[in-house]
Image (cartoon, rainbow, N blue to C red):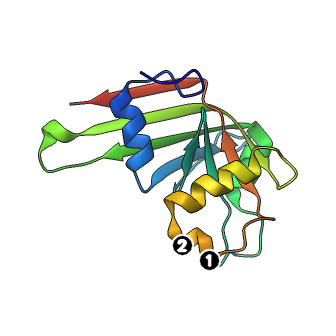
Amino acid sequence: MCSASEPDIPGWALNLLRESRTGHLATASFAAEPHVIPVCFALVESALYIAIDEKPKTGRRLLRLRNIEATGQAALVVDRYDEDWTQLAWALARGPARIITNSDQHHAPALAALRDKYPQYRAMELEDAEMIELRPNRWNVWRA
């Protein structure tokens, strides 16, 4: 059973989201050109958060951010693969996305959740970093 603030998906899918170390973020340009990249993420209540961390960047605004600014939409898929195909599972979240900064009330709790899940983030100065917030309005889940 999930709380009112969690996604209305089965418990095994919530556990998959909480335990998975990476997901794949999908965005598209205004011209519908797809872009998919692996990301670290955290589930906080019913939203998914992805930090724009300190890893080296190109200097140009990231395509994922430009796409979200253009369309306001994103998707995140999290999956579990196993050679024993009876263990396969995935969860797909789709919906409105936006870029938040530290002035947003959700930034600090999201950063705390990301740091709790990923110890590497504890050594990074992310208090002023932008973050992607995905608030899914559609979930698809599957397991073998």
Left or right of 84, for residue 109: right
Above/below status of 89 relative to 140: below
Residue at image point 75% right, 37% down: 72
Q: Which residue is situated farthest in the left direction here?
A: 84
- Callout 1: helix, strand or loop? helix
Residue in view at x 54 percent, y 59 percent = 116
Left or right: 9 in relation to 4: left
Give coordinates of residue 64: x percent, y percent. 67, 54
Q: Position of residue 12 (x, y in %)?
A: 33, 32
Quadrant for residue 46, please give it.
top right
Q: Name the residue under label 2.
A: 120
- Where residue 31 appears, as percent x and y from the top left, is 71, 41
Label 2 near label 1: C-beta < 8 Å?
yes
**Residue tagged 1:** 123
Specify the quadrant that holds the N terminus.
Answer: top left
**Residue drawn 58% across and 57% down?**
114
Nearer the observer, 139 or 103: 103
Mark 1: amino acid: Ala
* Residue type for callout 2: Gln
Marks 1 and 2, how far apart at CA: 6 Å
Q: In this view, does 144 lie above or below 117?
A: above
Q: Is 141 left or right of 5, judged from the image as shown?
A: left
Q: Which residue lies furthest to the right in this view?
A: 103
Q: Is mark 2 on a helix, strand or loop?
A: helix
Q: Position of residue 21 (x, y in %)?
A: 42, 56
